[in-house]
Image (tube, grey):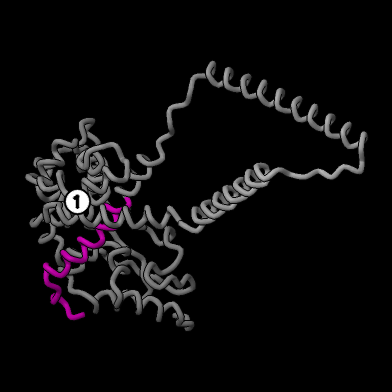
């Protein structure tokens, strides 16, 4: 990739797809919790009464069977030459019982073959894609550096009531169903809302989406984990993984653009010294891969660098190199 040739529109699409995966996981968690809510258990007294009743019935049934067996044995001892002949009604009853047993076994087999996990996964994919596409673009492409740089964005979507922060930056507040309805006016009524109702979720679409969207915003607006600041913290090159080669530090936000990124609000001043520990080959490849400005704006963590196919291919190649620097 040539330096400085990455259009914002293309990058936004990549960010939206990355964010979609985060949103889908958040929505899946909400749906699973809703679908697996335990049923209301009966009171203990009722269970005891039912247990005693069942025990009495079982005891009476056992006594009746014992009496019947004793009577049958007595009849057999009285006349061993008699042949027991079943009446047509008895034969028909047994045939019906066998048929019902076979039908039940077939139904149980069908239930085993049908995988409910696959159905749930498809349902989650459908709901996640449909609702995510309804979000405003600023939410679909939300990132940490955008959240910290745009005060109007924070005012628009609120912050946590308890004043929680991530690396000193306010965390997005929880959205209620009414706010979700404002953000997604076409959500309810809609085919998506009908699907949720048909699935027996027992909530409006906005009530389902609200906690998922809140969790999603907290996740994508959160500060990235702090990079390793010293050589001792790195087990090897953070790109190719080789642990027997000399490493040097790479400023994830290049020093040449420090003033620009702070002025434009891409990063805070306390983030400018974040570094990654790289071998010489990977360090050179990073600077060939993107310009200083693009590194600062788009590739300011190792994870972001390794999300690019070009860097993944280089990392795989470099990991196979076996010569050792002197």
Q: Is residue 182 above or below residue 291?
A: above
Q: Is residue 122 left or right of residue 112?
A: left
Q: Residue at x 22, y 38 (%)?
A: 204
Q: Is residue 243 left or right of residue 13?
A: right
Magenta stretch containing residue 22, yes or no? yes
Q: Mark 1 Cα within 10 Å, few/some/many (few <14, many 20+)?
A: few
Nearest to the observer: residue 99 or residue 311: 99
Q: Which residues are magenta?
A: 1-25
Q: Residue at x 29, y 78 (%)?
A: 310
Nearest to the observer: residue 171 or residue 138: 138
Residue with the most extreme top position: 45
Q: Secondary structure at mark 1?
A: helix
Quadrant of the rendering where the C terminus is positioned: bottom left
Judging by the rendered image, the residue that carries numbered circle 1 is 191
Magenta stretch containing residue 217, yes or no? no
Q: Is residue 138 above or below residue 210?
A: below
Q: Residue at x 48, y 23 (%)?
A: 42
| Residue 307 visible in the displayed image | yes
Q: Toward which corner of the image does residue 257 lie, by quadrant?
A: bottom left
């Amino acid at each position: 990739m040539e330096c400085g040739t990455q259009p914002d529109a293309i990058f936004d699409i990549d960010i939206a797809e990355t964010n979609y995966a985060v949103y889908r996981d958040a929505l899946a968690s909400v749906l699973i919790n809703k679908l697996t809510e335990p049923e209301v258990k009966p009171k203990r007294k009722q269970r005891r009464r039912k247990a005693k009743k069942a025990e009495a019935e079982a005891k009476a049934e056992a006594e009746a069977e014992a009496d019947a067996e004793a009577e049958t044995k007595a009849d057999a001892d009285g006349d061993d030459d008699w042949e027991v002949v079943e009446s047509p009604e008895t034969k028909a009853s047994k045939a019906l019982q066998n048929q019902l047993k076979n039908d039940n076994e077939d139904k149980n087999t069908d239930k085993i073959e049908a995988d409910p996990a696959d159905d749930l996964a498809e349902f989650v994919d459908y709901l996640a894609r449909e609702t995510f596409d309804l979000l405003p673009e600023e939410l679909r492409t939300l990132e940490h550096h955008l959240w910290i740089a745009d005060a109007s964005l924070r005012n628009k979507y609120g912050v946590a009531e308890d004043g929680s922060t991530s690396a000193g930056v306010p965390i997005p507040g929880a959205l209620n169903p009414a706010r979700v309805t404002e953000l997604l006016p076409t959500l309810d009524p809609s085919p998506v809302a009908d699907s949720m109702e048909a699935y027996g979720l027992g909530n409006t679409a906005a009530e389902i989406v609200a906690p998922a969207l809140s969790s999603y915003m907290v996740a994508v607006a959160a500060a990235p984990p702090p990079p390793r600041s010293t050589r001792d913290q790195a087990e090897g090159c953070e790109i190719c993984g080789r642990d027997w080669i000399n490493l040097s530090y790479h400023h994830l936000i290049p020093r040449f653009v420090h003033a620009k990124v702070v002025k434009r609000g891409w990063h805070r001043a306390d983030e400018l010294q974040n570094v990654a520990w790289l071998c010489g080959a990977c360090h050179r490849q990073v600077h060939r891969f993107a310009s200083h400005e693009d590194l600062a704006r788009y590739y300011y963590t190792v994870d972001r660098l390794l999300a690019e196919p070009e860097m993944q291919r280089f990392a795989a190649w470099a990991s196979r190199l076996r010569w050792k620097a002197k």
